[in-house]
Image (cartoon, helix red, strand yellow):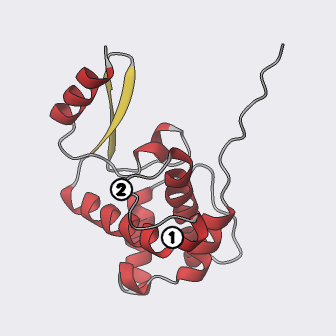
Amino acid sequence: MDQDAFRETYRNINDRLCVFEKSILTNQARCTCAERFCIAEREGVHCTSDDAQALCISLIDMLREQSRFALKTSDEQPALAHGKAMRIQIGGLRGLYAALYPGQPAPYPIPDINGLIESAIHRFGGIDALPLQPIIQQIAAYRGRKRGRNKP
């Protein structure tokens, strides 16, 4: 399947995309509102809830805005590179966990993205009231998988 046909089919099938798709597909997080699907040999993730998707979009938008300095990005970049997107997603979730449960290491994988976000909103009063320091620290500290060296 060529890339253009895949993108078109993906958009037609996935009317409510999961903004944490990269995290879920790399098995670093799970979500009770996420549903995996396959197109040919590729996987995608669909969100089963409009409300959950809206919360996730709000969180990702806020994290992206607040972590620009840590990621050395600007507003002009419409799409982030995979590594930076993963830093926002996984680092942001780990930071959210650290804000909710200080002193406890974040579980691997994050067991429920939607549950974590709802717990944080309930405790802190909303996305805009989240404590940014532990979240941005985790975003800055997150490093994805190291590339393996090619062996001769």
Earlier in the chain: of badge 1 and badge 2, it is 1
**Spatial separation of the CA atoms under disc 1 and disc 2:** 13 Å
Which quadrant does the N terminus fall into? top left
Q: Is residue 75 left or right of residue 48?
A: right
Image quarter where the C terminus lies is top right
Q: Which residue is mark 2?
A: 78
> In x, y percent, where is residue 59?
38, 68
Residue 131 coordinates in the image, percent (x, y): 52, 84
Density class for disc 1 (Cα within 10 Å; few <14, some 14-19, many ≥20) is some
Residue at image position (18%, 32%) is: 13
Q: Residues within 10 Å of mark 2 (few under 14, many from 20)?
A: few
Q: Residue at x 22, y 54 (%)?
A: 49
Q: Which amino acid, by three-letter code, is at mark 2? A: Pro
Location of residue 115 with respect to 130 vertically, above or below: above
Dot 2 falls on a residue whose secondary structure is: loop
Label for residue 68? Answer: 1
**Looking at this view, is 133 or 148 the one in front?**
148
Asked if 8 appears above or below 126 in the picture, the reply is: above
Q: Residue at left 27%, top 58%?
A: 53
> Up-down: is 121 above or below 45?
below
Q: How far from the left and from the top, in percent, is residue 146? A: 72, 40
Amino acid type assigned to the residue bearing label 1 in the image: Arg
Instruction: Indicate left or right for 98 with 75 as reference.
Output: right
Task: Give the image quarter of residue 112.
Answer: bottom left
Q: Secondary structure at mark 1?
A: helix
| Residue 5 sits in quarter | top left
Task: Tally the marks.
Answer: 2
Above or below for 117 versus 37: below
Q: Name the image quarter holding residue 117.
A: bottom left
Name the foreground residue: 63 vs 116.
63
